[in-house]
Image (tube, grey):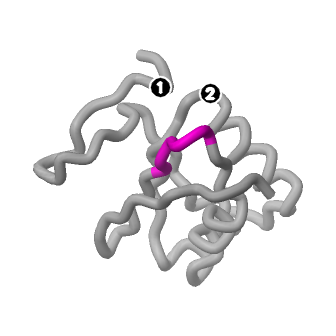
Amino acid sequence: MNASDKKKFGRTGLEVTTMGFGTAPLGNQFRAVPEADVRDVIKGAWDSGLRYFDTAPMYGHGLSERRLAKRCVPSRAMNMFSRPRSGACSLRCRRAR
């Protein structure tokens, strides 16, 4: 399996990468994670082809979602797919941070 392999997400019609990135650690779930590490790990995941990020409001009281949105890395008209536990949304990334 390659990080950039894609499949349909349920009945939504959206296409996501088969491999996802769980963002609980980005919300300091297990220990405090420095911003520089957050930036590097999200960039590394993006550069490897991942476009599916699994998040939840309870991860650091929304910290993981805020960090993910802040570090959203664009790739020429590509979408990032974020799946909060309360629903699903597709985010258009505008510029690197």
What secondary structure is marked by label 2?
loop
State the mark number for residue 4: 1
Q: Callout 1, which amino acid?
A: Ser
User: What is the crowding at mark 2: few (fewer than 14 residues within 10 Å), some, or many (at least 20)?
Assistant: few
User: What is the crowding at mark 1: few (fewer than 14 residues within 10 Å), some, or many (at least 20)?
Assistant: some
Residue positioned most to the front: 77
Q: Residue at left 17%, top 53%?
A: 12
Q: Callout 2, which amino acid?
A: Ser
Residue 87 in the image, given as x and y percentages of width and height: 29, 70
Q: Give yes or no for contact between labels 1 and 2 (Cβ–Cβ under 8 Å).
A: yes
Decide which of 29, 22 is in the foreground and name it.
Answer: 22
Stretch in magenta:
75-80
Decide which of 47, 94 is in the foreground and name it.
Answer: 94
Decide which of 63, 24 is in the foreground and name it.
Answer: 63
The quadrant where residue 7 appears: top left
The reply, left or right, for residue 90 in relation to residue 28 is: left
Image mark count: 2
69 relative to 36, above or below: below
Q: Tell me the quarter of the image containing the C terminus.
A: bottom right
Residue 92 in the image, given as x and y percentages of width and height: 51, 58
Of the two numbered discs 1 and 2 on the same chain, state the one appearing first in sequence: 1
Q: Residue at left 63%, top 58%?
A: 94
Instruction: Give the labeled residue for mark 2.
Output: 48
75 relative to 71, above or below: above
Separation of marks 1 and 2 at Cα, in angstroms: 7 Å
Residue 63 in the image, given as x and y percentages of width and height: 64, 75
What secondary structure is marked by label 1?
loop
The reply, left or right, for residue 18 in relation to residue 62 is: left
Residue 85 in the image, given as x and y percentages of width and height: 35, 69
75 relative to 61, above or below: above
Residue positioned most to the left: 11
